[in-house]
Amino acid sequence: MSPNVHALLQSGAQLADDALERLLPATDTLPHSIHRAMRHSTFAGGKRLRPILCMEAARMVAGGKDIPEGAADLGAAIEMVHTYSLIHDDLPALDNDDLRRGKPTCHVVFGEAIAILAGDSLQTLAFQTIAALPIPPATTVAILREVSLAIGTGVGTHSPLPPGMIGGQVVDIESEGKQPTAELVESIHRAKTGALITTSIVSGGLLGLANAKTAGHEDTISRLRTFGEKAGLAFQIVDDVLDMTQSSAELGKTAGKDTASIKATWPAVFGIDSSLKDAEELIADAFDALAPFGEAANPLKAVANYLVERKH
């Protein structure tokens, strides 16, 4: 039986918001400007998809009805990383955007210097939050490694690794104005967007395993990673399509910028209809990876379905 995805998203977003409210410094905490900037971007109306994916992966793997202890804080930490990336992406030196989630971007309200520092502070607080999770030290280290690799440039203990958000952003910047190819678009999407979505799911799974006290979990993590990679790529494909077909008001950000700047996007290479079909096929493949979890995977599947069926 499929869960009510809207209720699931609403309750998951509330859990994430409650954790973020508790973890972020209040606006009256000195120095005021940086904490107000952090909160401005964090509480600007995001869907909290990454925390929800994290919490649902943790619940599925732990095998209980409730979200495991610490999963909401982990999801909040991942949302901090996501928000930091958005603040920096919007800066004049990068995407130069003045609208995010329907509100003025951080640098428009607080200036470039504070916006840069707000992004830095959110990333730092994310790692601080993960380090304080009520889980075994080995699990903490594993999650910290997952998240740091998802942020980085592809350098790690087992190099060469696929690049994370920063590596994907660099390739995206350097390819702007060039004719996009299928290989280029996929590499950017898997790094710039897919890496953090994947690590949200894998990190949640690691926390869930710690709660379940389950040994020999290599297959579980491998399946979660496959699910995350497929769902993450589908999410960005749909995002590309929406950028071409929706208005700024519907998107909550400036529409059509990818097309105007000749960005490497999926529809630019494959067209809109083929892009939507590719997203559907990727979600079907993602579902296959969760087959051994049975009905326990239904909430996670429902969120993945939402990723490709959303209209904004």
Image (tube, helix red, strand yellow):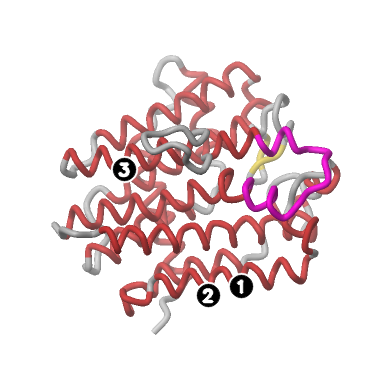
Left or right, residue 15 beside residue 105: left
Q: Which mark is residue 284?
A: 2
Q: Is residue 118 magenta?
A: no
Magenta segment, which residues? 171-188
Amino acid identity at mark 3: Ile
> Dot 3 corresponds to which residue?
143
The secondary structure that dominates the magenta segment is: helix
Find the distance from the CA under tag 2 to the CA under tag 1. Answer: 6 Å
Q: Position of residue 221 (x, y in %)?
A: 32, 58
Pointers 2 and 1 in contact (C-beta within 8 Å): yes
Provide the secondary structure element on which disc 2 rests: helix
Few, some or many residues within 10 Å of mark 2 (<14, 14–19, 20+): some
Provide the secondary structure element on which disc 3 rests: helix
Q: Residue at x 54, y 51 (%)?
A: 194
Amino acid identity at mark 2: Ala
> Dot 1 corresponds to which residue?
280
Q: Where is residue 171 in the image (x, y as percent from the top left)?
A: 66, 37
Few, some or many residues within 10 Å of mark 1 (<14, 14–19, 20+): some
Q: Residue at x 38, y 29 (%)?
A: 125
Number of marks: 3
Provide the secondary structure element on which disc 1 rests: helix
